[in-house]
Amino acid sequence: MASFLSDEGRYVGIDVAPAVIDWLRENYGSKLPNFDFVLLDARGTKYNRKGSVDPANVQLPFADASFDVACAFAVFMHMSLDGIRNYLAELSRVLHPGGSLLVTFNAIWEDEDEPEHRGRRYESLGGGLYTRQPDKQNASMGHHVTLIRELLADAGLELLEEVRGQWHATGVSAHAHGSDLFALRRP
Ligand SMILES: C[S@@+](CC[C@H](N)C(=O)[O-])C[C@H]1O[C@@H](n2cnc3c(N)ncnc32)[C@H](O)[C@@H]1O
């Protein structure tokens, strides 16, 4: 992004993990003046247990229609459905009409049934929701593609493209993740 954006371009990165934001600010804050790194105190089982705000109630600290592009990579597998719904609505709100949104899920496709990833099976919880960690809440969630399409449509987003992730392939290195990508447009 640093080499892509012009001086007028702006990038904002958001995360709930203070160490991540602190590291980015320390290492890039002064080098990249048009980059901001924002800590959001949203609660989550894996990354921010003591967060003060339920992701379902998060309001992104940005004005309506203030971004051209927004991305959420490998975030929704750690959130509740209500949290995802709210994030999609918020991401849509901050995009200009015609703006692009890229999000990833670990999608369970129509031809799959409880697939496995890195030795752990996605167990169905019903309603299109799956988990690889049934002992934890919203820790490593999978979503059936029908549910994903519903969530995206409910947020008023136009689906442009679905790209199947590498994690479905057998023999892929344990380090290759490659979640499923959904490219969207705010009408
Ligand atoms: C698997 S990592 C992905 C990191 C990075 N986006 C990437 O693609 O390499 C998940 C990230 O989502 C962040 N995260 C978890 N819950 C979040 C939430 N409710 N809001 C924003 N970020 C969240 C975590 O702190 C973590 O940095």
Image (spheres, rainbow, N blue to C red):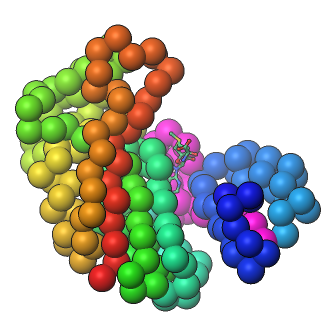
Residue 95 placement (x, y as % from top left): 46, 79
Taking the magenta stretch, the answer to whether it contains residue 109 is no
**How many numbered discs sit on the rendered protein?**
0
Residue 34 placement (x, y as % from top left): 78, 71
Residue 181 placement (x, y as % from top left): 35, 48
Residue stretch rendered in magenta on the structure: 34-53
Q: Residue at x 32, y 54 (%)?
A: 182
Along the horizontal axis of the image, is 21 left or right of 74?
right
Say whether residue 39 is visible. no
Q: Quadrant of residue 7?
A: bottom right
Q: Residue at x 34, y 27 (%)?
A: 167
Q: Quadrant of residue 9?
A: bottom right
Along the line of sight, which residue is nearer the eye, 57 or 64? 64
Compared with 185, 170 (above or below) is above
Compared with 165, 151 (above or below) is below
Q: Residue at x 17, y 47 (%)?
A: 145
Along the line of sight, which residue is nearer the eye, 94 or 139? 94
Compared with 64, 54 (above or below) is above
Along the line of sight, which residue is nearer the eye, 10 or 37? 10
Along the horizontal axis of the image, is 1 left or right of 133?
right
| Quarter the C terminus occupies | bottom left
Say whether residue 52 is visible. yes
Q: Quadrant of residue 66?
A: bottom right
Along the horizontal axis of the image, is 97 left or right of 131?
right
Residue 6 placement (x, y as % from top left): 74, 72
Q: Residue at x 24, y 65 (%)?
A: 159
| Quarter the N terminus occupies | bottom right
Magenta portion: prevailing SS class:
loop
